[in-house]
Amino acid sequence: MARFYRSVNLIILPFIFFSCQALAQHALPETNTKPSAANESIPHVDSAQFAAKPYVLSNGIKGILVKIPSHTPVDYGPLLKGEFGPSVLLTGQLFLPAKGSKQPYAAVVETPGSGGLGPQHMDHAAALTSAGVAVVVIDPFFGRGIKDTVADQNQLPFAASAYDVLAAATFLRTRKDIDAKRIGATGGSRGGTAVLMAETAPVSDAVLGRDNGLRAVVAGYPWCGVQFYSAHLADHASLLVMQGDHDDWVSYQQCQDETHAMGVAGQDVVMELFPGARHAFDREGVPPTIIPSAITSTTFPTVYMDDQGRYYNMRTGKVDPKLAGQTISQYSIKGGFLKKGVTIGSEGTQAKEFSDEMVSFFKAKLMP
């Protein structure tokens, strides 16, 4: 499949403008597939079972049950001041490469999106462990008594999701079979936002310290509605963002703006845009499916923060300490920016391409 954003040896490509001739040479995929209505048959991984019974990946690798200490900061501002909030014990499973692989392993934190754990996360773990990379799959919801956040994202602060990723990285660094300097993270949707924000310099430095952050992140179809104005990643970090141009749950243009700003700031970042792809296009075997209860806002203006987590006032363009996340949420409701109903799923080879790109990126950045 042709893409608008394509990395060549993972060189930064912030923007590429195709001429009419170039577009003609890159045929777009058929997008007339009629989405089916959502139902309980959408594959998922039961959180209670995942917390209690080792999961066996498609490549035969058996998970190790783990508990990961984390916290629930209420917003980015308090997090950056060291106010991490109530403690929580996350459930998860650690998957190590097959015996004979060289130790210590590079490792990746996998975190799910709003819908919770799904087969796609296990598929990613299988692909990475087959490539010699350890994976810890975390469940951000079960330990907090949350089923999912599809219809209500306010059940869990986005800052808490980012903190979970770094808590999992801290856990990995306690293991002698993991290389503390070669840890990355990946996630999709809310999980994509979590790993992206966890790799930003302000969040990473506040939780892990300077020069101790994640080395590589793959953010799948993240929400980029809140960004740090400074547009800096943690030291020595690399970022790959993959999104579809038919995504109706998040705005890929906001992520274009964010990755472009990071590129201008000299960060190692690349964004790949998949023509015809919808939200969650890494879900193999899930055709385009409507999720009626999902609430989205693809037109709400981007909200910026300074490196202390203080929001910029959109009206004045200046930092306003009085603004809070709740204020912005209320404005999005009163302004009529929200709508219900989104479409997820993949077509053709989209899921395989996502997985191949992810594995290739981590091999290049974590396995020299």
Image (cartoon, helix red, strand yellow):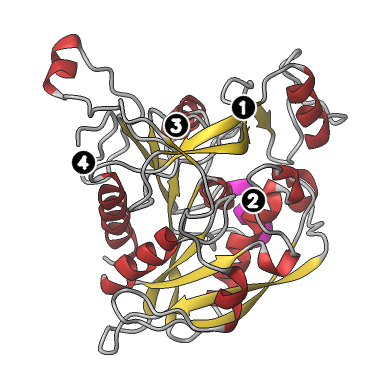
**In the current view of this chain or complex, which residue is farthest to the bottom?**
99
Helix, strand or loop for disc 1: loop
Residue that label 3 marks: 247
Instruction: State the CA–CA distance, disc 2 to disc 3.
Output: 27 Å
Per the image, the residue denoted by label 4 is 8
Label 1: few (<14), some (14–19) or many (≥20) C-alpha neighbours in 10 Å = some
Q: CA gap, disc 4 to disc 2?
A: 29 Å
User: Label 3: how many residues lie within 10 Å, few (<14), some (14-19) or many (20+)?
Assistant: many
- Residue 87, horizontal then vertical, whole percent: 79, 68
Figure quadrant of the C terminus: bottom left
What is the three-letter code of the residue carrying label 4? Val
Taking the image as shown, residue 253 lies to the left or right of residue 70, namely left
Element class at badge 3: loop
**Disc with the residue nearer the chain's start (4 vs 3):** 4
Amino acid type assigned to the residue bearing label 3 in the image: Asp
Query: Could you tell me which secondary element the residue under label 2 belongs to?
Result: helix
The magenta segment is 201-207
Residue 204 painted magenta: yes
Q: Which residue is mark 1?
A: 297
